Amino acid sequence: MLLKNPAHISCIQRLILGFLITAHGLCGVVSAQLVPEIAVEQPAGIDLVDGTASINYGNVILGASSLRTFTIKNIGTANLLNLAVSKTGTGSAQFTVVTTGMATTLAPGASTTFTVTFGPTGTAIGARTAAIRIANNDANENPFDIALTGAGVVPEIAVEQPVGTSLVDGTASIAYGNVATDTSNSRTFTLKNLGSGDLTGLTVGKDGTANAQFLVNTSGMLTTLPPGVSTTFTVTFTPAGASGARTASLRIASNDANENPFDIALTGTAYSTVADGDADGMSDWGEFQLAALGFNWQVSQPTLVAALANGAPAAGLYSAGQVQTLRVGASLTQHDLATQQFKLTVGLEKATFGQNYSPVRLTTPATSITGAGNLEFRFSAPEPGAVFKVQAQ
Ligand SMILES: [Ca+2]
Ligand SMILES: [Ca+2]
Ligand SMILES: [Ca+2]
Ligand SMILES: [Ca+2]
């Protein structure tokens, strides 16, 4: 190479040409330190090591994606040139590199970014691996290699009612049975995640003509279930109004791929304790309870009702056990720790046909102990057709 004007040649060329011991030699020593130096960060501020860095995207639901931003910096003293990002590896199709807006040349101190999005596709559960290579003119980090890993996972919803009995989305139907108005029947539903990815966005909605009478309680219910975790909610059927069938539907939303929403039909039959739909003198609920004796809440049977109310007990039409209901809603005995005494407290409630139960105040009970050692109350009631039940008080 013929040099006509040494003042116009580069410091590198002077080094090559051995001009170190000249007036330009000092320039040559300084120019030897002007080098590009790549640094790559992910996330910003976390320096990666060429060849050993591995970015783990973790578990990503099949069909969803996770984006990471990579920052390239030039921490050298000369321009970092020819920046280009390519990818390789068996799973590279599921990692998308976007370099839109990324600089291909970085002056010393400058930086730029690109993104890599992991979006597992297909139906296979498990790991995906790939690598990105950042081409550049760094002396010893070209290309700059970064491994990429991630796993494709799926959530899988299961709904059980009662617990242990799996329901089928769209065909499941929960029957609450025959319920008197103003009383309740509650069921607990269990949600489980049988999949490998988080089950998220769990909410319980409802619709259908009678959905107002099916109360959903999601208090304490988890809205995200990691694999293997379960949670519960309750649905309480409290019928009101006229007797008849009630239907509604539950809609359980989640990120399950093929069961969103998870649909469950709800059915129940209300029997009014106050309405007398067939106008024969006995409430619908009362007739339903005595159906075995021939009562039909939809067929007017005034003679049958009169027979029951006026003379049936004496005639043996029904036994006391059939119409007197022992319903103990709380403990009859209470233990007083201070005195070490137990106290038995009971009361009576009475209902005439077509009416709700109300307390019977035993102001002058005749109390005695029978020969068998049982406590016995004696009291009189003016209504021969009344129904009595013992209640804890
Ligand atoms: Ca380097
Ligand atoms: Ca599913
Ligand atoms: Ca009736
Ligand atoms: Ca009837």
Image (tube, rainbow, N blue to C red):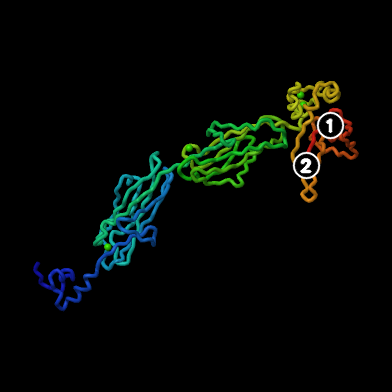
Tell which quarter ligand 4 is in. top right
Horizontal side, residue 139 vs residue 343: left or right: left
Task: Give the amino acid type for the residue marked by disc 2 in the picture.
Answer: Thr
Up-down relation of residue 27 to residue 391 (above or below): below
For disc 2, the neighbor class at 10 Å (few under 14, some 14 to 19, many from 20) is few
Residue 62, image x and y in percent? 42, 43
Task: Give the amino acid type for the residue marked by disc 1 in the picture.
Answer: Ala
Up-down relation of residue 364 to residue 99 (above or below): above
- Which residue is at 75% across, 35% downward? 327
- Which residue is at 54% across, 44% downward? 202
Q: Indicate the secondary structure of the residue bearing disc 1.
A: loop
Residue 364, image x and y in percent? 91, 39
Check contact, mark 1 vs mark 2: CB within 8 A: no
Quadrant in which the C terminus is drawn: top right
Horizontal side, residue 303 vs residue 214: left or right: right
Q: Quadrant of residue 128?
A: top left
The foreground one among 389 and 114 is 389
Horizontal side, residue 59 vs residue 322: left or right: left
The foreground one among 333 and 291 is 333
Please report whichever mark, 1 or 2, sits nearer to the chain's N-terminal start. Answer: 2
Residue placed under numbered mark 1 in the picture: 372
Residue 271, image x and y in percent? 72, 31
**Spatial CA span between label 1 and label 2:** 20 Å
Q: Quadrant of residue 270?
A: top right
Q: Indicate the secondary structure of the residue bearing disc 2.
A: strand
Residue placed under numbered mark 2 in the picture: 333
